[in-house]
Amino acid sequence: MMSGVTEMKETMYQPIGIPDPTQDQPLLLIGNPNNRRTQGIQEARHRLGLKPAVVLSYAQLLQNWRQGRTIADTVDFNLPVPLIRIDAPGEDWEVERELLFLGAMDDTSPLIDGIGAETFSAEQALELEQEWGRIYAPAQWFRGWKACLDRIGRESREIWPEVRFLNDPADIQLMFDKRVCQQHLSSHGVDVPPALPFSQLIRNYTDLCASMKAAEMNRVFVKLACGSGASGVVAYQVNPRTGDEIAVTTMGIEQRQGKTIFFNEGRLRKYTRSEEIATLMNWLCAEGAQIERWMPKATLDQRAYDIRQLVAGGQAGHAIMRLSRTPITNLHLRNERMLPAEAGLDEQRMSLVRSAAQAAMSAFPNSWSAGIDVMLTSGSNPRAYVLDVNPFGDLLYRVEHHGLGTYEWEMELLRKEPIQYA
């Protein structure tokens, strides 16, 4: 097999080789070979008696592109028409730099607004040294990621005209841009938190404050359009009587040689000084931000919660509650996780969650699975709102559905019911 298609070297697996076309359809996994997502999928396939996925490394693929080669130069032409799973590109610094390089080379597809507060040339991108937690040029990164997805789709279809993707590359792009995604969901009748209305594009802190005042919306979430894992999320509120401000976020700020550097610190910080809040908001708006009403979530024992609901093949499967005494519930911030049954969440509420998640997934008819973040309002007659659609949202630990982990459940569904798109 040609360079770039990785064989898993774990002792529990046999070397991959070429899948037998008389057996199950081969799964081509585009991802980072040694991370927990890839390992989880391979372990699930092993337990189910399925052949290991063929793994196409992002690092190798991106390097090959930079050197003028294509996917056709990377995969074996004898591979039968595969089902392609595009997985998350994160947790690999080499891949991060390559995507920033692609973003520097492709300036034709900026975000809806915002050209990026920070940019690197193609040469600078490849020479960057990793600083733990630093957020590097997100608008440029997203341009690179979109270019990567476009090229994966185009070159794969050139090799295999009948190829199917687990999640279509264009849908992944759409899910990743929180602004476009929320507009898309709303246009399909899915309830989402109301976006902050504005008469002109919100390009900075001053525009944000003016729009909030005009809309009488005193509490908002400002979210980096292409962020994940709470990176670039700010829960912001203004006291309409006193003008006092509070911004809660994981973002840290550092001044270095006249330049402002932003970090995802992995813990929440509270900013109350207008100068610091303006620095945060100016950067977020320049990089591209989704700004929406901060809606009060349902609570359990004085902790706000939302629910990550996995949907695959139209079915609502694994669900996990994320509970927090702060406005931001992401689990990597050491917030509490709980199964809905453990929390005593009744069927009425869980039915609302499942229905909202399935409705969100149905808005992407060319994609098969996603983790949907859903909030419920408080009270005896709650409503469900979709907060986010995560194309790689199936990495859920210690939660089962019908006795199966997330990857086992998905692989079993694929074995029983081949993918059908509308």
Image (tube, grey):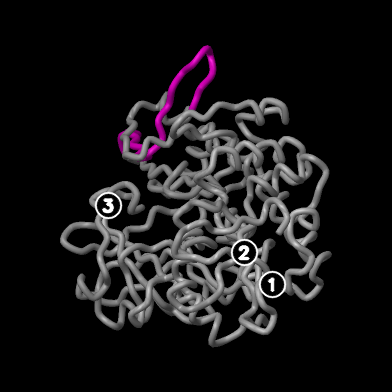
The residue that label 1 is drawn on is: 82
Measure the alpha-carbon separation of dots 3 and 2. Answer: 35 Å
**Number of marks:** 3
**Residue 34 pos. (x, y %):** 50, 51
Question: Which residue does the numbered mark 2 point to in the structure image?
Answer: 54
Which residue lies under the disc numbered 3?
335
Please name the residue shown 31% across and 35% down the image: 270
Residue 69: x %, y % from top left: 81, 47
Q: Residue 352: x percent and y percent?
A: 38, 78
In the rendered image, residue 326, in percent from the top left (x then y), is placed at 27, 48
Question: Which region is colored magenta?
Answer: 241-261
Q: Quadrant of residue 77?
A: bottom right
Residue nearest the observer in this picture, 37 or 336: 37
Q: Residue furthest top?
A: 257
Q: Secondary structure at mark 3?
A: loop
Q: Nearer the viewer, residue 419 or 308?
A: 419
- Could you tell whether 8 is left or right of 103 in the image? left
Describe the element under mark 1 as helix, strand or loop: loop
Magenta region includes residue 110:
no
Q: Earlier in the sequence, mark 1 or mark 2?
A: 2
Image height of 264 relative to 173, above or below = above
Residue 394 visible in the snapshot: no
Q: Earlier in the sequence, mark 1 or mark 3?
A: 1
Seen as rendered, the residue at the extreme bottom is 416
The answer to whether residue 237 is visible is yes
Which of discs 1 and 2 lies nearer the camera? The answer is 2
* Mark 2 crowd level (few <14, some 14–19, many ≥20, 10 Å Cα): many
**In whole angstroms, how far apart are the C-alphas of marks 1 and 3?**
39 Å
Relative to 275, is 288 above or below?
A: below
Labelled pair 1, 2 in contact (Cβ < 8 Å):
yes
